[in-house]
Image: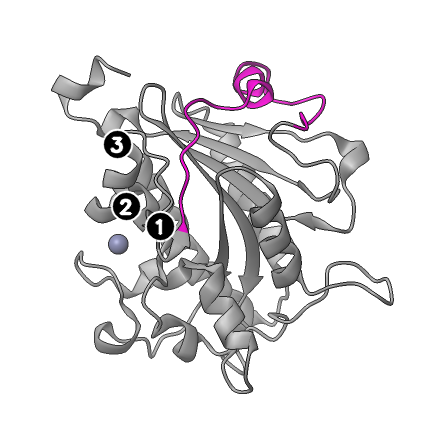
Amino acid sequence: MVYQKFEELGRWMWEMIGLSEKHGTRFGEETITDFILLDIARQRYPNIRVIQTPKNLEAEKGTDWEWYVGANGFGWVRFAIQAKKLKIASSRYESLNQKAGTADDAELQATVLRAYADANVGVIPLYCFYNHYPTATQADHWQCPLNFEKELLGWTITPLHNVEHALAARGRKSFDYLHKRPGTIPARCLFVCPVLMAQYLGSASTAAANTFLGEPITKLAELPPEIRAGWETGSIEAFSPDFYNSQIEIYPRRILVVDVSEALPESLRERA
Ligand SMILES: [Zn+2]
């Protein structure tokens, strides 16, 4: 099952980041993200694909990651994700207010992510965090209905509105603060927690009132054509303006597609 792979990666992250601190080796979120992709790609899962993006579009102003999660016949949810690694010494995400690029007028990454979500159909903006925080507790830092397992906090996600809230005042960039916020959950929750699974597998709805972790959700009825082609070939040549607004010139650096139809009850699977 997909969620077990994400649990494994969460525990691995927890351990690796703890070890790196102990041994004084440093690596950043970009390295971790690329290792996750490599680990997923090399195992050739039938229901997970890593898709290479066009190199010429690797602008400074991009999003780290885009995930399409869903199933044919049920629709697809589209996540745009910015990754951050916890600084162990301070237990804070020191670069949470990082700018996108080096230009004098560069905007915050969080601002770029919000612009991307507003300009493109169906995008739910998230941050993902890579962590090691041994004093985490169920009472304070576990916002998931399933059983507490501290190591699964090695890889967590939160909706962008939580990060915007954190950036609005001093003292809110810590693991502690962000993991006390509802909606900050282990990354694996996206593939196993019942409330979230119901969003992919429920009837394809475009009702504006629907939210996913507090961000508006509009499911795509089908994968964009270039993503469908990329599922077969492993790469895409170009982003279509129908799904990637060419006015804002923000594109994802990495793409992951996860088919969750295996999680469907047998009776529903025939629809997919
Ligand atoms: Zn959960």
148, above or below 258, in the image: below
Q: Amino acid at mark 1?
A: Phe
Q: CA distance from mark 2 to mark 1?
A: 8 Å
Q: Is residue 236 magenta?
A: yes
Residue drawn at the location 18% of the way across and 56% of the way down: 146
Determine which quarter of the picture holds residue 35: top right
Dot 3 or dot 1, earlier in sequence: 3
In this figure, which residue is indicated by the disc labeled 3?
A: 201
Residue 15, image x and y in percent?
42, 61
Residue drawn at the location 55% of the way across and 64% of the way down: 85
Task: Verify CB contact (< 8 Å) between mark 3 and mark 1.
Answer: no
Instruction: For label 3, count other residues whose C-alpha is less than 10 Å away and answer few (under 14), some (14-19) or many (20+).
Output: many
Task: Tell me the element at label 2.
Answer: helix
Task: Tell me the element at label 1.
Answer: strand
Determine which quarter of the picture holds residue 240: top right
Residue drawn at the location 68% of the way across and 28% of the way down: 241
Task: Verify CB contact (< 8 Å) between mark 2 and mark 1.
Answer: yes
Mark seen at residue 196: 2
In-front residue for pair 123/155:
123
Residue 17, image x and y in percent?
50, 64
What span is in magenta?
216-241
